[in-house]
Structures are given as structure tokens and as C-alpha cells.
């Protein structure tokens, strides 16, 4: 994905306000042992790009004055209530060094899982992304997680995810293995079962 930016010489609150009033927005590029560079971008073009999932998890081609750099989107600052991006941070990418990034999870086949199809359960997505490290060339746009065999009251953890070749799960603690998906009965079915049990009937299974 390509992003076109322009060098920015002025900084400060007043300069940023004037920039936004002209339909542009401030940003910065940093990293890769190179001095940070102030940039400005077209607000509307970037706003639409930011709404695409791939823009947050892909290596981007950032062009300034005909020179292209490989970057990752690292931070976005939004206006508290207006549909307005206030500032963006991009990090330069070294093709020979691993990067750590949050990768979206796409859950597949959940409607045919035993938890849903046979037991009438619901699947709760606890996490919609996981943090992983890899070389830039191995970075996937997303990771598919097959839920076709998921049973009622079963959970999947981060370490259960099958990662693409060259991609490693990033865990910050030795025992860390967070739940990404869990299954349970809908609250209405739980209440119905409880009522039937109190009335002396056999609970529904």
C-alpha cells in the first residue's frame, strides 16, 4: 500500500492547526537509526486508508519527494468526537530485522462448529489480534483461525493459533497464553435451564 507525504518544516500547535484547516494533517517518520522526519499528508486520503484493516498490519510504501521508504503505521491520534485524525506516526522498516506488530485474527467456520450447530452456543471473540514478530517480508495481512471443531465450553488460547512460516508469537511473560476465543450457552438458555431445574425437571443438555 502506498502513501504520499510531503516534508514539513513548521511544528507546534499553531502550525498543526493551520495545517488541519487546509485539509492536511501532521505526522512523523522515525526509526532505523535515521533522524526523525516531520511530514504532512492529505487528511481525507489518509482517513479512508486508516479505516482499512490492512493499513494497520502491512508494510507501507511511504513516498516523499520521489523517494520511497518502507514503514509501519505505529500510532494514530484521533479527535475525541469529530471524524478527524490529528497526527500519525510511522516507523521505518529494516528488511533484515524482525519487527513486532499486532496482526488481525480472522475467525473462520464458526457457524458450522459443534458449539454452535449442535449445542446452540455462542462464540465470543476475546481477542481480535495477536502480537507476533517476523521479518517484514513474512508479515501476513491477517491470520486465519479455524473454529470448525470448537466444542461448547471450550476455549482457544494464543498458543493454539497456527502461525504462518517465519512468524513467532510474542509473549511478554513466561506463563502468558491469553484466551482468544471462548464458547458458552446464550444467557436465555442458561436461564431456561435454571428455571426448569427449579421446577423439578431435568436440566436441558
Image (cartoon, grey):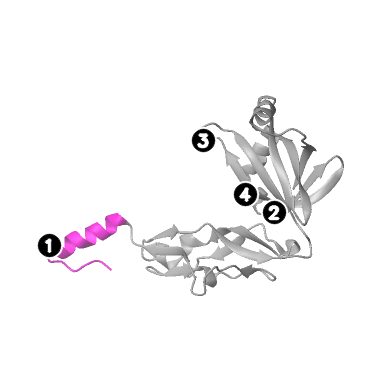
Mark closer to the observer (2, 1):
2
> SS for tag 1?
loop
In the rendered structure, which disc, 3 or 4, sits on the residue that comes first in sequence? 4
Q: Which residue is mark 1?
A: 199
Mark closer to the observer (3, 4):
3
Magenta-tinted stretch = 187-205
Q: Which residue is mark 2?
A: 58
Horizontal side of 108 relative to 166 (left or right) equals left
Q: Which residue is mark 3?
A: 80
Q: Between 192 and 143, which is closer to the camera in this rendering? A: 143
Badges 2 and 1: C-beta atoms under 8 Å apart?
A: no
Residue plotted at (42% across, 64% down): 182
Q: State the separation of the CA atoms marked 1 and 4.
A: 50 Å
> SS for tag 4?
helix
Badges 3 and 4: C-beta atoms under 8 Å apart?
A: no
Residue plotted at (45% across, 59% down): 126
Q: Which residue is mark 4?
A: 53
Badges 4 and 2: C-beta atoms under 8 Å apart?
A: no
Q: Verify whether residue 131 appears in magenta.
A: no
In the rendered structure, which disc, 1 or 4, sits on the residue that comes first in sequence? 4
Q: Verify whether residue 203 appears in magenta.
A: yes
Q: State the separation of the CA atoms marked 2 and 3.
A: 26 Å
Amino acid at each position: 500500500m502506498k502513501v504520499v507525504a510531503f516534508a514539513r518544516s513548521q511544528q507546534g500547535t499553531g502550525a498543526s492547526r493551520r495545517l488541519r484547516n487546509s485539509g492536511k494533517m501532521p505526522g512523523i517518520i522515525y526509526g532505523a537509526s535515521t533522524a526523525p522526519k516531520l511530514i504532512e499528508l492529505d487528511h481525507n486520503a489518509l482517513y479512508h486508508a486508516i479505516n482499512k484493516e490492512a493499513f494497520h498490519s502491512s508494510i507501507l510504501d511511504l513516498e516523499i519527494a520521489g523517494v520511497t521508504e518502507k514503514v509501519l503505521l505505529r500510532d494514530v491520534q484521533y479527535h475525541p468526537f469529530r471524524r478527524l485524525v490529528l497526527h500519525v506516526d510511522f516507523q521505518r522498516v529494516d528488511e533484515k530485522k524482525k519487527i513486532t506488530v499486532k496482526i488481525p485474527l480472522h475467525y473462520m467456520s464458526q457457524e458450522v462448529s459443534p458449539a454452535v450447530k449442535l449445542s446452540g452456543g455462542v462464540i465470543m471473540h476475546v481477542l481480535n489480534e495477536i502480537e507476533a514478530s517476523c521479518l517484514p517480508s513474512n508479515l501476513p495481512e491477517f491470520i486465519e483461525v479455524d473454529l470448525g471443531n470448537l466444542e461448547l465450553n471450550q476455549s482457544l488460547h494464543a498458543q493454539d493459533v497456527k502461525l504462518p512460516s517465519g512468524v513467532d508469537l510474542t509473549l511478554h511473560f513466561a506463563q502468558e497464553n491469553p484466551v482468544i476465543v471462548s464458547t458458552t450457552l446464550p444467557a436465555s438458555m442458561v436461564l431456561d435451564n435454571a428455571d426448569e431445574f427449579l421446577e423439578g425437571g431435568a436440566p436441558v443438555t
